[in-house]
Image (cartoon, rainbow, N blue to C red):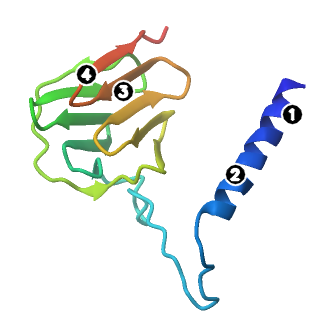
Amino acid sequence: MRIIAAAAACAALASTAASFAGAAPAPPNARTAVHYACSAANSADVPCRFSTPTGNIRCLWTPSPNQVTCELLSNHRAYRLRPTGKAKTVHVTISARGETLPTNQLLTFPESLGCNATRTTMFCGQAYGLGEFKLSPKGSHAAGRRAR
């Protein structure tokens, strides 16, 4: 019962937000191109570099081994997350900025890894709660437990 009420509330909120989103509708011939980070034709086989919108955090996903590594540029704090366990502190320099991860997108990778960003913070974790990390100028942490 609560799930149905929550879904109805979310739908009402979404329709209200959509009605206030813009003053004038887009012309019928206008196309809005939505870019999804790390979504090229062969994206499952090649490493992907991405960053926060401000560029203060750079990340690299590699398909083999399947892992996400992110570095906070101001103090060079970096974490690595693999599907098999908790996030670990690593020493790495990610030289290229890569694609900007929009704040409204969740970037998902194989084996339940995913990342999302705010303007200055990057969150990466596993779908089933085995591990996660948060990189931020105002407090970073890594957490999780090893898979059994």
Distance from Cα at disc 1 to Cα at disc 2: 15 Å
Q: Earlier in the sequence, mark 3 or mark 4?
A: 3
Circles 3 and 2: CB atoms closer than 8 Å = no
Distance from Cα at disc 3 to Cα at disc 1: 35 Å
Residue 14 tag number: 2
The quarter of the image holding the N terminus is top right
**SS state under label 1:** helix
Q: What is the three-letter code of the residue carrying label 1?
A: Ile
Distance from Cα at disc 2 to Cα at disc 4: 31 Å
Q: What is the three-letter code of the residue carrying label 4?
A: Gly
Q: Earlier in the sequence, mark 2 or mark 4?
A: 2
| Residue in the image at 21% along x and 30% along y | 137
Q: What is the three-letter code of the residue carrying label 2?
A: Ala
Q: Nearer the viewer, residue 18 or 45?
A: 18
| Residue in the image at 84% along x and 25% along y | 2
Residue 139 tag number: 4
Residue 104 tag number: none
Which residue sits furthest bottom? Answer: 29
**SS state under label 2:** helix
